Amino acid sequence: MRKLVLAVAGAAALGLGAAWAQEASQPLPDEHWSFDGIFGTYDRAELQRGFQVYTQVCAACHALEHLLYADLGGPNGLGYSEAEVKAIAAQAQVTDGPNDQGEMFQRPGRPSDPFARPFANDKAARAANNGALPPDLSLIVKAREGGPQYVYGVLTGYREPPPGVKMGQGMNYNLQFPGHQIAMPQPLRDDSVTYADGTKATLQQEAHDVVAFLTWASEPTMEPRKRTGVKVFLFLLVATVCAYVVKRRIWASVH
Amino acid sequence: MGAIGTVSALWPFFASLSPARDTIAAGAPIDVDVSTIKPGQQITVVWRGHPIFILHRTPDELKMLQEAKDTGLLRDPDSQQPQQPSYAANWHRSLKPEHLVLIGVCTHLGCIPRLEAAPGGDLGANWPGGYFCPCHGSKYDLAGRVFNGVPAPLNLPVPPYNYIKDNLMRVGENPPGINFEISEIEQI
Amino acid sequence: MAAPVKQNKLIRWIDHRLPVFTLMEHELNEYPTPKNLNYWWNFGSLAGIMLVIMIFTGVFLAMAYTPQKDLAFDSVERIMREVNYGWLMRYIHMNGASFFFIVTYIHIFRGLYYGSYKTPRELLWMLGVVILLLMMATAFMGYVLPWGQMSYWGATVITNLFSAVPVVGNAIVTWLWGGFVVDNPTLNRFFALHYLLPFVIVGVVMLHLAALHQHGSNNPLGIDRKGPQDSIPFHPYYTIKDLFGLGVFLLFYAAFVFFWPNLLGDPANYIPANPLQTPPEIVPEWYFLPFYAILRSVPNKLLGVVMMFGSIFILFLLPWLDTSRVRSATFRPIYKWFFFVLIVDCVALGIVGAHRPEGIWVVIGRIATAYYYFHFLLMMPFVGWFERPRPLPTSISSAVLKGGGRLAGAGATMEKP
């Protein structure tokens, strides 16, 4: 039945042409994630690979405004030690100051610094990107309908525009993106990065890893949340059963 | 006596919620050089937090506006409703026919309409070109006049503005001798 | 709890000067409650508990939140990421709004079904409607505080409704905003009011309870208590029953807070507010959707606003619109069906509110809006006149003894014997 509906919908979309197709939303991919479900957790190796993809590819245009380098460490982090976090932070140049001469100066980053931003402000970002603003990525997974599936769909959804589709200037064809015209050129391809842990860097692998990383960036407190949730749920279950038993006993005399 | 005292005592609290002096100062008029806007092009400037559209209309578009008056498609083709200063209550809803100045806020529920100047396209074969509001589908022509059968009740508002030089527009200030307050606009 | 109270010397000393213990004894232990209340009567106390949860989490969130337009969004994210258990407090508060409305709506529909608004409980009902209005104002302003896209544009759309007022509409809106658009002054005052109003709600809830305790709870049979055989003390019978209900409720609530915290929210509110870009679609939170649907179903803007607010204000008149003298719908064969249609109608309005007003949705929205008003303005008075109610039991205890509790319809069958 579902297949039939999809087939009919597909035929209709083709038949009614580009204008209508813009309205019809693309089905989301069906990727499986380590953080799915109420017991799901982040896979630290995956997150670190995703962080590598972010640093080497995405960070050229996209900021992670709400993250500090310190967030990479600790129990909710990516599994880096304190020394590793320090080293990662130190790779960034941060403007600080004013110093005693009243001047701003550059220094290596510290764990307490927010992630370095690729552009000084939104105007600079637009100027460098043909008028389009690369969105901040720290909440991208929570800020899009479909969450990780949608972001994965965009990253793997680049295609040649079908014949007859007129593309805007500087736009790229993307199956997942609403309207199919996206200003961002295809960011990931096979072997865009060379993974430190030797994992084969296919487009799908890179997209999967970076989406996992971005999901973590959107909600670094997901693991304690689910852990606490399971405990709270079990406690409430026992407490409710107890309350029910007591209630039955107290009310026994009334009926 | 008691009532006078109570109302007087409450007045400062009530009035404190009105725009503060610095807020009003920040709403002072702004100057815009319109010589850089090419025919068919629109720029958006911000005045009092509202997006102000300044559109340079082509002769073809102006011709269409004159014809549109009698088609019966527009709700208020002659700008009868107080949505503009008196000097913009004409067929082109502006001081100079080519420059259209609008407060880019849909009169339905305050979203920002987008310019869809090209006729036809996604908005249907009989779309003459104009503004389309993505929130609830209100449509306006290239003079900001609202079409019939859309949720927006009124034409897009025209703010007070003036040319202080031939190509220098001042948004927020009337031409000399005219007194028009933005609060006279029925609805922004 | 109550029996040994008077024996303690300190308690006696305090009680002599400030009779709080006498009051508690009177309102909890001696307070006679109908013995046949079903589980639908749990939702009043659940709403009270939700109010406490919201105030408690809200006060702690306020300690880390910054009501300034450039910092508000970031401060909420800081609460989520850096503040210890900040995510927990925010998710409890955020989902709490939804669950507060769920229990309140069920509480209201329970009152509608069992005629709890009828004499002598008219003021009790009207105070409840005041609480609903205050809740809505509080929820609306609270949603603005994270200063996301939906916060900002929701605030713009809703405050703009007042511009429909003839002549002074625009002046009112400017006054509400404290500026020429929704801006920092608006955020500031919304925060101040969002913090204040819950305490006003607490005050009205006190009056609601005072009015409740004047004549006591209504019950599924809708008949008055005839004597002590119809009553049981509130404590321990209903304290334990409420406690059990609370446990079941918290299980649902916790599932959302811990496992699906963003399911009821809009993703667009994780994008910072941008006054120059409207989101593709502005949708209010689910608990406002039926009202939003009424607003959008009426072609005239002023009339739409009037009918939207009217849909709540009409509840103030309900005690006089309903002409039937029988309280419980259990004994009202015709009204009962209209009641269920009203529930379907409200759900339909909610679904319409979530869709763009195009095509079939406009038609459904208009029919559902018309039915809503038909229900209260025409059906209520007329059905009361021509409907022949089923015979009422002589007393609560006789109905309970005869197993007549079964008569009490869906509610009573929930009650385990």
Image (cartoon, coloured by chain):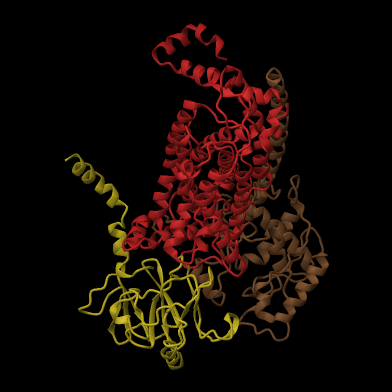
Chain colours: A brown, B yellow, C red
Query: For residue C369, which quarter of the picture?
Result: bottom right
Question: Could you tell me which quadrant the N terminus of chain B lies in?
Answer: top left
Assign the C terminus of chain B to one quadrant of the image: bottom left
Is residue A78 at least partly visible in the picture? yes
In the depicted view, which residue is nearer to us: C286 or C88?
Answer: C286
Q: Position of residue C200 (x, y in %)?
A: 42, 38
Nearest the eye: A226 or C356:
C356
C35 versus B144 height, above or below? above
Q: Based on the displayed image, in which of its 4 quarters is residue A239 positioned?
A: top right
The percent coordinates of residue B164 (x first, y second) are 27, 82
Label total for image: 0
Q: Is residue C266 above or below residue A243?
A: below
From the viewer's side, name the closer residue of A251 and C214: C214
The residue positioned 58% from the left and 32% from the top of the image is C222
Q: Residue A102 in the image: state x and y as whole percent.
A: 39, 58
In percent of width and height, residue A184 lies at 63, 73
In the displayed structure image, the side of residue B11 where residue B158 appears, left or right = right
Residue C63 seen from this side: no
Residue at the image point whose x is 31% and y is 61% from the top: C168
Choose between C399 and C129: the one closer to the eye: C399
Q: Residue furthest left?
A: B1
Q: Is residue B40 above or below residue C361?
A: below
